[in-house]
Image: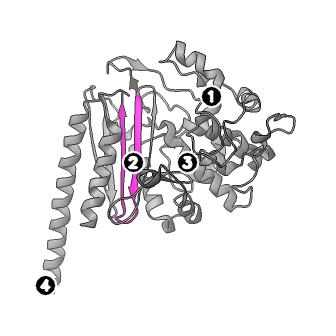
Amino acid sequence: MTTDRTDQTDRRDRTDRSETALRDRLALEVARLEAPDVVLGVTRRGRRTVVTGGLAPERTTPREALRYELGSLTKTYTVLLLVTLAAEGVLTQDDRLAAHLPPTLRLPHPASRGITLRHLATHTAGLPRIPYDLLPGALLRPSVSGYARYDTGRLLRTFAATRPRHPAGSRWSYSNFGVALLGPALARAAQGTYPALLGTQVLRPLGLTGTTLAPGPTGADAVGYRGDGRTPLPGTDMGAFSAAGAVRATPHDMLGYLEAHLHPAATSLSGPLKEVQVPQLHRGGRRGETHTLAWFQHPAPGGPLLFHAGAVFGQQAFLGYHPASGTGLAAVATRRSRRCPLMPTAYNLLYGLAEEAAA
């Protein structure tokens, strides 16, 4: 009995020392980022470690309780919704996009008619990064989002008028435009709205009560800043591009989302969560990268590392996880500039934790 108690005490001490070392490590990186607001959170072996900091004055709501704009990380939520609806038989991933658009919408380009929902999810539809009619505004007003004035009708009309750059499925090319089209397609297929479907099919089953698509009450959301780190920016209205970039979440909800991917069997979305992690394509030769339905995938010690990043004006976010070691990392910061290297910092942290776990 004494030996058992001693072993338990030793394990507890080792865990506490490991937790302290991790907290110190995260605190050092938070200070190095020199952003107005920073949150770094790690989940591993069933424990969460969250460290916050920043140059801006602390608000009434703690940084780790604020909701941050996730930008392109939204795409992982949208693709999970796609796979969940497919698992329920509402649609299939290889349905033609045209089958879930208004029948009155004419598609004059044959290549457009060959695009499937899977092509949109995997950025292989041949569509440009953003619609061509957004380019003039982006050039003239680079610090102003043009998405807010872009409604679903315009999105669909622009798609109909856009000639894909290459046949669907033949080449990878990152596209906000493509994933945005999943929003109205999924809504029409499931006879609902994209926000409602995401809530009922993904957020609620995973217990993500701190995740939403809309701004919250005053003080609930993080405030982004221009490059000077002082000038506040309004929240980003994504318009018809909600499926590509409108999700907002607290750091703890981000960790909960990662934990669902790390331990799918513990959720009611086990099948879809496993499926979005299955590799779909590889590009760039031996030194290139693999893509699953929803995530970028890189080799790492012990097994692959999956990740995605996102940014809007004044905010940036990163999510990554290493299934082999059960480790996940969530990172957010206000201010998007080269002086705040959140993405490489978060990626290197996660890779280092994976490396240590495999040693």
Residue picked out by circle 4: 3
Q: How far apart are labels 1 and 3 at the CA level? A: 17 Å
Q: Position of residue 20 (x, y in %)?
A: 17, 54
Of labels 4 and 2, earlier in sequence is 4
Indicate the amino acid at tag 4.
Answer: Thr
Q: Residues within 10 Å of mark 3 (few under 14, many from 20)?
A: some
| Quarter occupied by the N terminus | bottom left
Residue picked out by circle 2: 252
In the rendered structure, the answer to whether residue 344 lies left or right of residue 23 reads: right
Indicate the amino acid at tag 2.
Answer: His
Q: Is residue 104 visible?
A: yes
Q: Residues within 10 Å of mark 2 (few under 14, many from 20)?
A: many
Q: How far apart are labels 1 and 2 at the CA level? A: 26 Å
> Which disc is residue 239 wearing?
1
Which tag is nearer the camera, tag 4 or tag 1? Answer: 1
Of labels 1 and 3, earlier in sequence is 3
Indicate the amino acid at tag 1.
Answer: Gly
- The region drawn magenta spans 315-334
Residue extending farthest right: 104
Q: Position of residue 276 (x, y in %)?
A: 55, 57
Dot 4 lies on which element? helix
Q: Position of residue 215 (x, y in %)?
A: 52, 31
Of labels 4 and 3, earlier in sequence is 4
Indicate the amino acid at tag 3.
Answer: Tyr
Q: Residue at x 66, y 36 (%)?
A: 165
